[in-house]
Image (cartoon, rainbow, N blue to C red):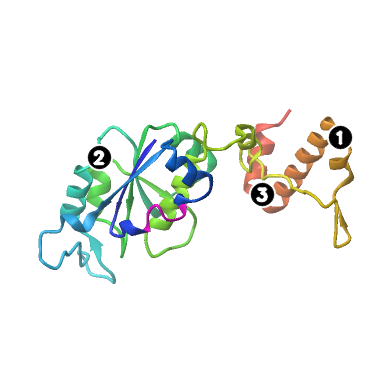
Amino acid sequence: MKVTIFTLFPDMFPGPLNDSVVGKALKEKIWSLETVNIRDFSKDKYKTVDDKPFGGGAGMVIKPDILSESIDSAYDKRSPIIYMSPRGKVLNQKKVEELSKNKKLFIICGRYEGIDERIIEEYKVEEISIGDYVLSGGEIPALALIDACVRQLSGVIGNAAALDEESFSAGLLEYPHYTRPSVWRGKEVPETLLSGNHAEIAKWRKGQSESITKKRRKDLWKVYRKNNAS
């Protein structure tokens, strides 16, 4: 997978994507990263990229003529192009798995009050949010999206089976984990996990996942119950 980022702050990349399993995969060229500095396409001596919004209001908006030139310099017009936006659909594991199947991914990182709406219309941009809150720009959400997608690629996670047991993989939150020592500060590991009975361990883990999901995420629990109704 090749990921291209349109941003005013290219130095924010690869950032944390240069470390851990995702960083190792970057060095091994399982995926690659390209940044396009939107400001490079400004025509004035001040490198202006934004202007006041029509109709008034606070903040500034990234200009469509400059942003479009930056997009046209790299976008292949066939692959998904995404704008990290708090008004987009909230990212979930299903969407991550869908996006990770693409050979190329293009991401627009906004700043200020955002980008001109005509860019979204012109390029059929998909808006994606990482949660119901507002950040200073789209770079941090882009880092999260890329990390989530890259770890789905073949060869990134050493034990690929681990992906099948993570939160959201079966519509449930993940069960609790324990490791040595078996007793720590008077707290013992659940006896089932020490039994060596794999069927009972699987049953315990599923029960824990169901219990945690029901308690913490009633929205997920409702969908899970509907999909698993007998």
Q: Is mark 1 on a helix, strand or loop?
A: loop
Q: Magenta segment: does it hold 14?
A: yes
User: Which circle marks residue 218 in the picture?
Assistant: 3
Q: Return the residue at label 2.
A: 75
Residue drawn at (25%, 40%) of the image: 75
- Nearest the viewer among 64 and 137 is 137
Residue drawn at (28%, 47%) of the image: 120
Query: Of the residues under marks 3 and 1, which one precedes in the sequence?
Result: 1
What is the x, y in percent for residue 194? Answer: 87, 41
Instruction: State the CA–CA distance, disc 3 to disc 1.
Output: 32 Å
What is the x, y in percent for residue 151? Answer: 52, 40
Q: Given the image, on which type of amino acid does mark 1 rest?
A: Gly
Q: Given the image, on which type of amino acid does mark 3 rest?
A: Lys
Instruction: State the CA–CA distance, disc 3 to disc 2.
Output: 40 Å
Q: Magenta segment: does it hold 60?
A: no
Q: Give the range drawn in magenta.
A: 12-16
Query: Mark 3 or mark 2: which is in front?
Result: 2
Mark 3 closeness class: few <14, some 14–19, many ≥20 residues within 10 Å: few
Q: In which quarter of the image is residue 201?
A: top right
- Nearest the viewer among 7 and 26 is 26
Residue drawn at (25%, 44%) of the image: 121
Q: Given the image, on which type of amino acid does mark 2 rest?
A: Tyr
